[in-house]
Image: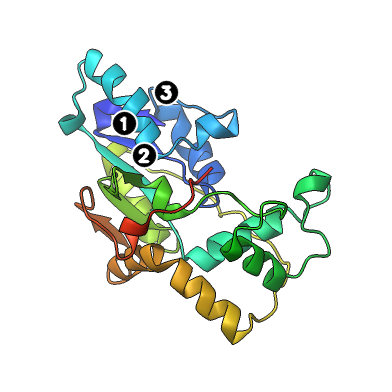
Amino acid sequence: MTFPTHGFVLLALPKTGSTTLERALAPYAALVISSPPARKHLPARGFEREFVPALAARGHPRESYEVVTMFRDPVEWLESWWRYRAREGARPANSTAGMPFEDFARCYVEGARSAPTPKGRPARFISVGGVVGVDRLFSVDRPDVWGAWFAERLGRVLDFGRLNASAAVRGELSPDTRAALEQHFAPEYDVCRRLAPTGVWAGARGTRLVGQESGGREAQ
């Protein structure tokens, strides 16, 4: 969603409450892309390539707005994919019904191509040219922070309701799998450490994250 007259653009990182945010913010946006998923969840590098020139041509140079996105603990992010694909009606090839989260997590870390795991990662979603490509990140777990920021930018009271939640239980991860995830998600945990004190990381653009130079899979 773009809000150039209000000085920001919101990128929809998958599994970070984008549907809830869209419901509350869309009425005030200049542009809302709700589908298909590849367009709705366009990563930072795609935004730089496709929308920065278009906005500049309409009188909104890149320096006139902040690119913002939500972020969450990466294991919780991965768990959200597992829950989502366990729902009734999921495509058989992507279904995690009957698949323990432990197995799902191992398949993700190992890059098993036939597994119903996401093909991306949050650190790649926010990256452009090997560094962070967004200006401001918010912790999903701090609605008091991001809710107040959006309300101040738009100049109105906003009702975000509740973020979607699932009652499914993932179970405890084995120490080996937990360690593998923590190592794999080193760049994501770098972001989480920066978010921890206040729930927001402003001025993030251009930062190279821990382990980011090793690359990673695209977030889709």
Mark number, residue 44: 2
> Can you tell which quarter of the image residue 193 is in?
bottom left
Q: Decide: is 32 above or below 153.
A: above
Q: Residue furthest left?
A: 63
Whether residue 155 is visible here, answered yes or no, is no
- C-alpha span from label 3 to label 1: 16 Å
- The disc, 3 or 2, on the residue closer to the chain's N-terminal end is 3
Q: Decide: is 23 above or below 186.
A: above
> Can you tell which quarter of the image residue 133 is in?
top left
The answer to the question of whether label 3 and label 2 lie on touching residues, with beta carbons closer than 8 A, is no
Q: Look at mark 3 in the image and give the residue it sits on.
A: 31
Percent x, y for residue 43? Answer: 42, 39
Whether residue 53 is visible here, answered yes or no, is yes
Amino acid at pointer 3: Leu
Residue 147 as seen in the image, left or right of residue 61: right
Q: Look at mark 1 in the image and give the residue it sits on.
A: 48
- Residue 75 vs residue 4, the one in the foreground: 75
Q: Residue at x 55, y 51 (%)?
A: 15
Amino acid at pointer 1: Glu
- Residue 139 vs residue 39, the one in the foreground: 39
- Residue 184 vs residue 151, the one in the foreground: 184
Indicate the quadrant containing the N terminus: top left, top right, bottom left or bottom right.
Answer: top left
The answer to the question of whether label 1 and label 2 lie on touching residues, with beta carbons closer than 8 A, is yes
User: Which type of secondary structure does the marked residue at label 3 adopt?
Assistant: loop
Q: Residue at x 33, y 67 (%)?
A: 190
User: Which type of secondary structure does the marked residue at label 2 adopt?
Assistant: helix
- The disc, 3 or 1, on the residue closer to the chain's N-terminal end is 3
Percent x, y for residue 185? Answer: 45, 66
Q: Residue at x 72, y 72 (%)?
A: 169
